[in-house]
Structures are given as C-alpha cells and as structure tokens.
Image (spheres, rainbow, N blue to C red):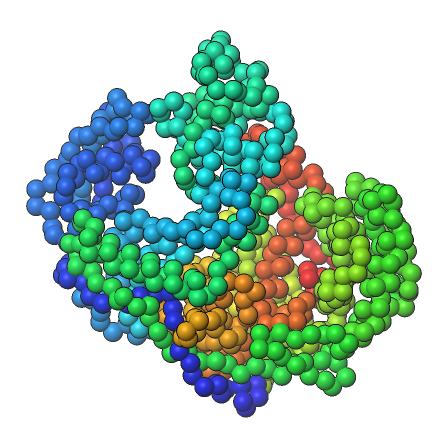
Amino acid sequence: MNKTDTEYIEPTTVVTNHARLNSIRAKRIYVYTVEITNADAPDEQLKDTQTRIELFAKAANQSSLVFDGREYAYTAHKLLNWSTVSVHSANAEFAHTAFHVALHLHRTYDTQALFKDQSPKETTGTDDLDQYSRGMEFALDSIIRSAGAYTETLDKQHGDDKATGFSVHWEHRASVRVLRSGVYVAINAHARPITNVKTVADLARAFFRGNPGPAGPAWTRFDANVRGLRVCVGSTYVVLNGLTTRAHRDLRINGSSIDEHYKSTDSLDSAWPCAVIAHTNTPVPLELCKLEPQLLPRISGWQRMKLMAQSVLSSTQRQHMLERAVQHVQKVCAETPGVSDFGITVSSELARVEARVLPRPRISLGSSTFAQLDPHASWTIDRQTLYKAAHIRKWAIAVFCSKQQCPESQLLAFSKQLIKTAHELGLSFDESKPQITYAQTNRVYDTLHTLRDAQFILCVVPSTSVSLYGEIKRVAYTQLGIHTQCVNIRNTKGSRTKLVEALLLKINTKLGGQTTNSFQPSEPTLYIAADVCHTTEIGVSVASFVWSIDSGQTFAGTVVQHPKRQEIIENMDVLVRHALRVHYKHTRVKPVQIVYLRDGVSDSQLGDVRRIELDGLMRGCKLVDSTYEPRVLLMIARKRHCTRFVQQSSDFENCVPGTVVTQMTNHNGFHMVAHHAIHGVSKPTYFLITHNTTQMSEADIHNMSYNLCFAYPIVTRAVTMPAPLYYAHRLSGKGRVQINAPFDMLPYFTVKKNAKAKRAAEEDVHLVPVHHNLADSMYFM
C-alpha cells in the first residue's frame, strides 16, 4: 500500500439506531423453562405460539412473569410456590383439550455483570464469560420484545393502497445488544405489507390487477400468497394452507356442493378455486374468508416493487421515526406489567459515536489517466479507455425467439451501437457484422455448438426464464467452454447507452480485460474469498471459492458441491493448494500473506470456520511446500444486520462513502459504509476480524477493505463489500448451473407435487467442473 493509505481524514461523529440502556434496577433475572403439554399426552408439547401465549397468561394469573411465547419466562423475583396448572384454550381447535403449564428454573443472571468492562475478546466461540453475556443479552432482548413491535404508518402514501391489497406499515422492533462500548437497545425498522381489504377474494383481485379468471395454472402464483393467512370463516378463525386446484363448482363437502354447505347469501364465483383450511383440508370460498389487518406472508414481483416505492424514506424521515420508537421503548419499560418490574431505563436520545472517513484510492484507467471521483464515490467512463481492454476477433449472436419478435434489423442496430461504444472505451471488435442465428429454446446445445468458434456469444432471450438462462450457461460452462452474455429482447430496442456500457464491462471482464486498477499491495498477497449458496433448483448447497491470479484485480474460481444446508467448507486444503499453484503460474511469486474473506457466517459458526476452514487453509499451504508459512488474515463480512449510521447534522444525511465505525461491535471488528445509497439509508457492512498474523495494522485493514470496494469491474462506483466477496457470491449463484443434467429438466421444474419423487430425482443431479477453456477466467461475471 501507499504510505498515505494508513492515514485517515479528519474524524467525524455519526448517529446510530441504538439507544443506550442506562441501568437495570433488578439485581437478577430469573429464567424459567415453560412446558405446556396435553393433559392426555404429557410428552406432547403444544407448538402453536398464539395458543401457548393464551394458556400461559391464564396460568400466570396476573403474576409478574414475562413470557417469550416459545420456551422461556422471565421474572425479577424468584418464584416460591409455583405448581403445575391445568387450563383450557378458547381456540376452537383445542376447545375440548386440557393443558398442563409447568415452570422449571433454568438459570439466574446477575445484571450488574453487563455493565462491567466490555473490551473486545478473541473470537473463539468458546469463551464462558462471553456465553454468559450472550445469554443475558438474549434474556433482556426477550423481555423488551415481549411487548411487541411499535408500528406506525406514513402520513403520505404513494398511489392507491386498495390496488395493491396492502398498506405499508413501518414496524420497529427493539433488541438488546451488548457491545464493547456498552449495552444498547437497537431499533430495527422494516416496511411491512399489511392487508387492507376485506376478503381473500379482494386480495386475489389486487394480486391479478383485475378479474383472475377461472381456476387454472395462473392461480398457482397466488397460492403462496394465501398460505399462512389467518382468516375468519363465519365466526371461527382458521389458518389457510393454499388453494384447491379445481374450481368451486366442482368441489363437494360430505356430498353437498360448496353453495349448499355454506348457505351463503353472498355472490360466489363458482369458477374460482377455493381456499384450503389447514389441518382439516376443508375448502372454503375466497369470498367467505374475511381478513383482518395482518402481515402478508408473501407478495408478488410487481407488489414488491410497489412496497419498495412506498417504503423509500429519506434519512431525516427515518431518523425521526426511530426517535419516536425510542420513546415507545421507554414507555414499554416503565408501564408494561412484568417488564416494569426489572426497572430498565433507556436513554431518550439515539447514541452518537466517533467515526473515521477513509481516503479514496487513485483509480487508474487506460492511457495513464485517472478516474475523477465525485462525492458519491463514483466515476464515469464516457470516452475514457479501460485500464486493460480485450481484443475481440470473432463474436456471434444467438437469438432464442422468432424473427417477428426480434427482427434482424433491430439486432444489427444494437450491434452497431455496441461496437461504437466499445471503440470509445478502448475495446476493439474485428467484426462489425456478427453472425446471427435464430433458434428455438429447446435447441440450446446445437445452436451454441455451431457458434463455438466465437470468443463470446451474445444470447438474446425472450424473458427472464430461469430454466432457459440456466441451460444456456450450463452448456457454455461445462460442455463447450464458451463465454456468453445474455440480454433480454426488450433491451435490444432503441438507444441504451448505459446498458450497453454495462454489457461491455461484463464482456471485457470475462475475456480477461480489466476496467480499472485501484490499488497495489505493498507485498505479494493472495486474496481469496468464499461463499455458500443453498440452491432450490438442484437440491444441494454450492460452495464457491475465488482467488486472485495477479495483484488482486483479476480472479479465478471454482465451485464445490456440499450436502444440503451445509455452510462450512471442509476440503479447504485442496482448494488452497490449487489456488496457490494457479497464482504462482501467473505471477511466479509465492504470496507472503493471504487475505481470506468469508461471507455468510453466523456467530454460532465462527468456531467451525476457525477450526475447519482456517486449519484447512494452513494445511493447503503445507501441501505446496512443507516449509511455506504465509501470514494470514481471516475476516468475516456480514450484511444481514440492523445497524445503521447517519451523519450528525440537522438533516441526518447519509454517511459519506468510506466511513468506518469501530465502537458498535462486540468483537474485534468494524462497520464500514463504502458506498453511496441510491435511496434510503446506507447499510454498512460489518467486518469481523477472527485471525490476523499479518503485519497490517487496524488502519491498514480498513483501507485495504475500502480499496477493494472500488475493484468490482462491472460498475463504476464503490460497492458495499470488497470485490472478492461479490465474485464469490456471483460464482455460488452461477455455480448451480454446472450440473450433469439439462437445467430445464431438473426435478424443481418437472416434479411439482410428489416430494418423495423429487428427492429421489435430485440424488442423480451433481455438479461438474467448468470446461478447461474457461478455467482461470472470470467466466462467472
């Protein structure tokens, strides 16, 4: 790194979505396990959460116990005379069943231990004190959450709510976090779609944006939207479990038609399917399923876009909402029965913490020029040459639709614009008029095989079909070894300069080019990154592993098949050995240090990553040379968290790109806002340093991470995470197509109902290596 890389710009102050938990009056928290069993079957635990809460409330009978609805109850005073209580539920499903409610003391926590020194500890996952703090954190979290979420709606909604079937409600949930700088209550804000129509029939009309038509394949898309909905049929509340496949008029209940059974005076559409009541599998007309405001289990693609549009808030709006949520938490702690016994006091203000802003790297382009960064950490490439441009001698276009849908003249105009923009960026095309081949969607292999002499094939597809896209990539990756770039037919119409530039950046990267050069490590370094994708199409988990083959700008990768839902990579030694050999083949230098970036690891898996993956990395080095011991940095990156930061100003603006916060963690790590948010509040990435034997200081690690955020070659801005993590994520997603069977013939697409047959068919599907023509390239971009 350059000498200036270890320096910061002037410090700043940011406002978090955390309020400090000042004190707890209760000296101890008593935790009891709750057993709610069927009186006739003592070994059978009741699982329904709402019924458990109802029965526990009856059994507790005004006591100061706080129940989390699942397994534990909490109190500030030890219970002296609790005995098993027999109660009945008002739920019609359990009306004739007696239940026993029993409590057993599980653990006692000393609350003052929370306010002792919270200095960062070595993250081993086995520290007893750390486990004790985490247990108390969980207990306090459950106590405050027991009062439920704080919900509010915006004064101004966008568009017609009835047209979507839901209104946007902002839900704020409080959670307790024990951090190195103290104990906090974090406010997690989420936009939720809450039903605002009267019946499931109205919800169907909103979903289909009109009359859905008779029962048929179109209704299968709505089936998932009603699963889990709680509705009122007559005077009874039930939960729905999907839709019938047959129409209302073709169904019978005990020999009677649907109309005769329900004797409804409402107008029922006999061509529609019925909803299915869970547990009893009884069909009920959609018009008779009355809805109360509740969270929609699932929404469609266009509804999701509406939700996003309606839930976009400025950082100022969001901050004022958080301040109101903190006031609600204070009220909960002071007035809620049971919770108030603990005497929890929370600050009325959101926490302010110190932060640092990192210097931006110098980004080299072609012809010895440098990119001019704007305040949003982005730059333009208009008429600026790429750092390393590919030379394209031969290319072709494969069109998987008819000439009526996509005329040849339209493709020629698009290819002309592609070549013109490529020339401005420094990319050279020897052919101005590529070979154009029209083909049917079931002739992917034959079509690509006839064009196999091309350096890359531009594939024009009629839709975003997963099966067609997967089959194109499967054939190209595993059988023919050809670089492909898919583009939707609608994107070939008209002049789309920005889209064409994005396509060219992808093509250039796949063919070995380089968009920019944002940094040079001070000593030979191997960058590796890994991620695991738990696929739905092939029924296995796909582990991706990428590594740098030069100074950190160009990467190669491979995928490994895992058992379903397995997150930890076990054959790390073999992967590292291969990566070191490929890296040495290109650089002729052994790396002095290895930077390992890992995505998708939870706190409970940290010990396994250190014990299995880090040890495997060390063994891989020994497989290359028994005396080879490079220095290693292992860093976990996470995006699934609820921590947010804004600038301390009157408008609470988003943090500038490069902002680093080290105080709001409970381990040796930091939060970094590397990017500029397009809308809403920037979401920082949390980096957890779990192992470091390198000579890099904390500032060096911050700068290295930030510089890598500028190295993602298919965009011209800083991204949220270091580029190697994005490569690993893309490869784990693309790796699911590297299989031994046609993608569109997978059980996921062909076996819909029989789960046993689906699992049996999935056993014959497995990953295969990428074609040797694509090895050591960034084909996955």
Residue farthest toward the left in the current orientation of the protein: 80
Residue farthest toward the front in the current orientation of the protein: 156
Q: Nearer the viewer, residue 427 or 616?
A: 427
Q: Say if 278 sits above or below 341 in the image.
A: above
Residue 189: percent from left, percent from top: 41, 56
Q: Say if 231 sits above or below 263 in the image.
A: below
Residue at the image position 84 percent from the left and 48 percent from the top: 406
Horizontal side of 194 relative to 92 (left or right) equals right
Query: In the figure, residue 133 lies in which quadrant?
Result: bottom left
Residue at the image position 67 percent from the left and 46 percent from the top: 466
Q: Nearer the viewer, residue 707 or 634?
A: 707
Horizontal side of 581 relative to 510 (left or right) equals left
Res 744 seen here: yes
Q: Nearer the viewer, residue 384 or 617?
A: 384
Residue 53: percent from left, percent from top: 26, 39
Residue farthest toward the bottom in the current orientation of the protein: 3
Residue farthest toward the top in the current orientation of the protein: 255
Residue at the image position 49 percent from the left and 54 percent from the top: 311
Residue at the image position 15 percent from the left and 33 percent from the top: 85
Q: Say if 687 sits above or below 163 in the image.
A: below
Horizontal side of 430 relative to 76 (left or right) equals right
Residue 221: percent from left, percent from top: 59, 36
Residue 8: percent from left, percent from top: 48, 85
